[in-house]
Image (cartoon, helix red, strand yellow):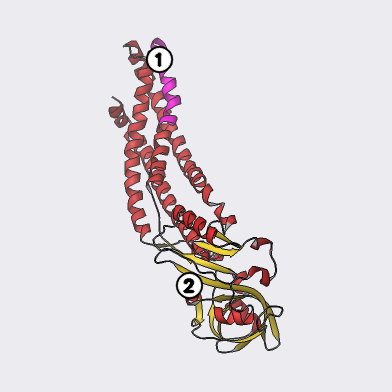
Amino acid sequence: MAWRNLFRAPGRNLTTGGVVALVVFLALVFLSLYGGAMDAFFRLLLERTGHLVVRVQGYGEKESLEELAFLPPAMDLPPGSQVEGVLEGAALLIAGERTRPVLLTGLEAQGFARYRAYLAAGRLPLASGEALLGEALARALQVGLGEEVVAYAPGGMGLGVYAFRVVGLLDLPETSLEARTLLVPLEDAQALLFPGRVTRLEVRLSGVGLYETAPLEALKEELASRLPGLAVETWLEANPAYAAVLPLYDLVMAVYVGFFFLLGGLILLNTLYLSVVERVREFGLLHALGLTGGRVMGLLLWESLFLVGAATLVGLGLGLLVHLEMADGFRLPFPDWVLEQYREFGLPEVLYGRLGVKEVLLTLGYAFGVALLAALWPAWVASRLEAVEAMRYVP
């Protein structure tokens, strides 16, 4: 009876079903987009820091380079792992009569390779004495490719002065960072600042998923016991401000999707209530024939479940098809000014959609919940009708 009743107002029910299908479709597309954006954001953090970061203990409270720098220790790591040394220090960059304060960073070859995508001109350093500058920094100093700059960093244990030839310019996502970025070979940075030392070691493991923390915690504890005086952190611990966002992912995702279904639920509630108003005399007859209030409520609940269930299957199918396309990569369809703000966070314009079982179950759970909640009040009204009064009802 519940299934047949859906065909008594086909136009209205099709419209309502279309809205529910659209809500399910949009929820899946949003979840795929949101998951892809979160993955890109945390992948960027992981790329910048490595899976594990080794620094001196209490590095956050130390200020001088002498306190922050340390000799790289030998580490026993799983097969396929890589360790990269990084030396960072403040310097004054001089080009002719112009000077700018910079963050001088010494990198190994693997570290330079990760900046290939940001090269706006020139090439990566291949030999000692070559450097990469942020485009904003190069404009401020009015230097170009092939020109010479001098880094001045007194007070350390190194030479204090070192000349570099600019071989590449970087178009970095963050403009503020681009205006103070100077990347040089690690050996040159050590000669300038602190011979043989680094300010951090980046450990990168193979075969570890983006959100897998168990193998990282196990290796962290093992290394910490073997490296006295040094602190070992996972990439999330090394980025505490951003790591705080991760536990909120599920909550934010559920709230946004909930707004979609709230609107769909209001339309479903209106449809079911109109159905009750149009069938008051019919419900009165059912009561007179002995149908209990609970059975009448069940009838309305089943009508809602059938309508939402059919619409959910349609929306689910369309949403999964679009997700499969998004999973292969898609470019954000935003205006240029929005994309510019997006780039400031270092996020790529091309994302890869991610949709797991958890997200699909969340969508189905919302659909099932809306079907029940939207039908409760109309079903309760129908179950409370008096048989005689309802049969005499004239709309």
Q: Name the foreground residue: 310 vs 244.
A: 244
Tell me which residue sits at (69%, 84%) in the image. Answer: 98
Determine if the magenta segment contains residue 34.
no
Q: Quadrant of the C terminus?
A: top left
Q: Quadrant of the N terminus?
A: top left
Camera-near label (1 vs 2) is: 2
Amino acid carrying label 2: it is: Arg
Q: Report which quarter residue 351 is drawn in.
A: bottom left
361 left or right of 171 in image: left
Q: Which residue is mark 2?
A: 114
Where is residue 343? Give x, y as percent. 53, 65
Q: Report which quarter residue 366 is drawn in.
A: top left
Please tell me how crowded label 2 is: few (under 14), some (14-19), or many (20+) other residues with Cα within 10 Å: few
356 left or right of 220 in image: left
Q: Which residue is mark 1?
A: 390
9 left or right of 213 in image: left
Where is residue 216? Give x, y as percent. 47, 56
Q: Secondary structure at mark 1?
A: helix
Amino acid carrying label 1: it is: Ala
Where is residue 308? Give x, y as percent. 36, 36
Tell me which residue sits at (40%, 15%) in the image. Answer: 390
Q: Name the foreground residue: 108 vs 350.
A: 108
Which is more N-terminal, label 2 or label 1? 2
Residue 369 visible to an observer of this rendering: yes
